[in-house]
Amino acid sequence: MDKKLFITILLSSVFVFSAFKYDGFSYFFLGALVSAGVVLLSLLLACFVKKNSDYYDKNI
Amino acid sequence: MIKIFSELLLHPGIFLILAYLFSYLFQGVARKIFIIISPIAAIFLLFLTVDYRVDEFYLSLVFLVVLAAGCLLAYSSKMNDKENAQLALLYFGAAIAVILTANLFLIFIFFEIMLVAATFMIFNGNNRLSSTAGITYFKFHILAGILFLIGTITHYTEYGNFNITLQNFYDFSTATKQLMNVSILLSLLINIATPPCSYWLIEGYAATTPSGSVFLSVATTKIALFLITKLFLGYHCLIYIGIFMGIYGILYAALESNIRRILNFSIITQIGIILIAIGIGGSDGSEAAIFMIVTESVYIALSMMCAAALFFSSKSKRYFQMAELPRLNIILISCLVAFASISSLPFTPGYVGKYLLYNSEYVLYNPWLKYVISSLTAGIAFSVGIKIPMFVFGQKFHHKKKEELQHKMPYIRKVALMSLVSVTLVFGIFPEIVLGRKIILFDDIFFNQISLLLGAFAGFFLLGKFLIVRKKYALLEFEWIYRYVFMKLYDFVRRLILSRIDSLKEDCINIYQKMIDNLDIYFGNNGRLVSIKSQKNITLLAVFVLIVLIITL
């Protein structure tokens, strides 16, 4: 069997098991939501970026 | 006297400081062997002198293991790291002395010794940023040192001694006591790089040599955290500071492309999570905080060592300039262990720390905090734990070809990496070594944690491409605000002075005239002080006072 497929099946079975037995789905979505939040906020933060890489060398 | 002297020599911290001084007596290979043997000898001294059940013992032991591994790394490189390995003896010696003492004034003195050693370590980086980063480090730590000294002196005036007594730090009844608590807490918060005073950590650790950053990342913040755990356990305000630090580190790490700077931001997030544990307080919070401080020292050192190894093999600091590394390389294994710990994957020490937090009484009564800690864990996994391995070892991002690389890794560097990997895994799989009790790791938290990390991984799979940076740029930090505001203030004051220069001149002349008049009243020909009849008596009195002062001091 392909290694990647095997790992995917293994991980998803763990996930499905935990989602049924415990509160896994909410944690899965929390993880995905946090990732989206981090991307959004960091892109906002990127507005305050100086394109010049020598910025600190020149200004400190 | 001889007993005190021998006890001092057997103290692992003092031993390392003396080892630093004596290392200058040797040259070449002899110095190399002396520096590598010193931390190992200090480990034996630690077992001889310190009770191995206390937290101080574990933290000192971890420091010594990291010091030994860092020295091996320093001597495996062809850079100017030999001096840093030598300075590290002084740095870690002072650090261990801080951990093992219960006297506020001695803590202050050893903090200052650490400051000197660390500043020179950053100066040894010999790159464009090292001088400015070293000065920034020095400025912030001098500020922290002054605040700590103020706290120490007020403690002495209030209680008449320098001994640390825990109830003193929970007493806010008088203004002096408030000043003492606030100044010491502020000093320690600067030492753990709380934003807006975090710039020294980000630049300082990235500007030194690769092995220098391994040394620096271990001791400074961890010792301050250890002291906060000792003195300010259960201050609930620390929970909110910790949450702020966590979010700050995650956001900046997500945008950064320099691997060492990403790790520095991850240190800030980890410190934030430890601060939450300290803020929770009680035996649960204290246990979780100490466990996280001890284990984080190891896996952060390991991740810094991985960054150093990547730098030595690729000769570049940013992930988009990394070369393709061979599969199943020792660097890959150690990177996976280090970043799995940062992401709090089960069977790593990072997970055990979070497990203890989730099970603490305060979190059980305040479920919102559980979700906050989970979110911080997912965030750090997304922006550091998954990002670096994917971007460094992923196929798409390589610029250099395989042939350009030198795959030969010195044997000594492999030993250094593997020693830290094994210590990390032991802490993760057998946490009872530090905790002193067994914990059940397979329960709902285990599965929830895996779900959370899978969610973060799915998020990275979908959104990670937005974080790919292929250009060098500078992220603006709080430091920029200081500089901007202070420059504006300086300009304003300068303009004000220039516009009022004439009136200021007149004011100055008036003040000068008044001073001369006053001096005449006291020291003139018929002044009050000169008119005292017997000047001889005054001289004798002054000499007597000086003698009394010398004797009493």
Image (tube, rainbow, N blue to C red):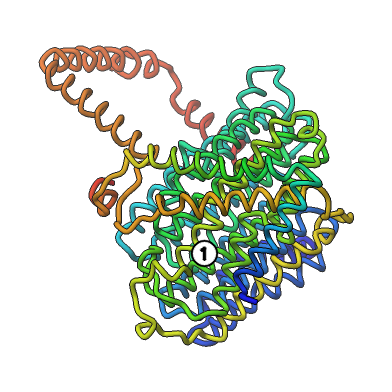
Residue A32 showing in the rendered view: yes
**Badge 1 amino acid:** Pro
Residue closest to the far front:
A1
Q: How many marks?
A: 1
- Residue B210 in the image: state x and y as whole percent: 46, 67
Query: Front-most of B203 and B35?
Result: B203
The one nearer the camera, B92 or B320, is: B320
At 46% from the left and 59% from the top, the residue drawn is: B260
Pointer 1 chain: B
Residue at image mark 1: B389
- Residue B274 coordinates in the image, percent (x, y): 66, 44
Instruction: Provide residue A55's location: percent of width, then percent of height.
Output: 26, 49
Residue B55 or residue B497, whichever sits in front? B55
- Quadrant into which the C terminus of chain B falls: top right
**Horizontal side, residue B226 vs residue A35: left or right:** right
Q: Secondary structure at mark 1?
A: helix
Q: Position of residue B357 (x, y in %)?
A: 75, 43
**What residue do we see at 42% from left, 42% from top?**
A42
- Residue in view at x 46 percent, y 77 percent: B325
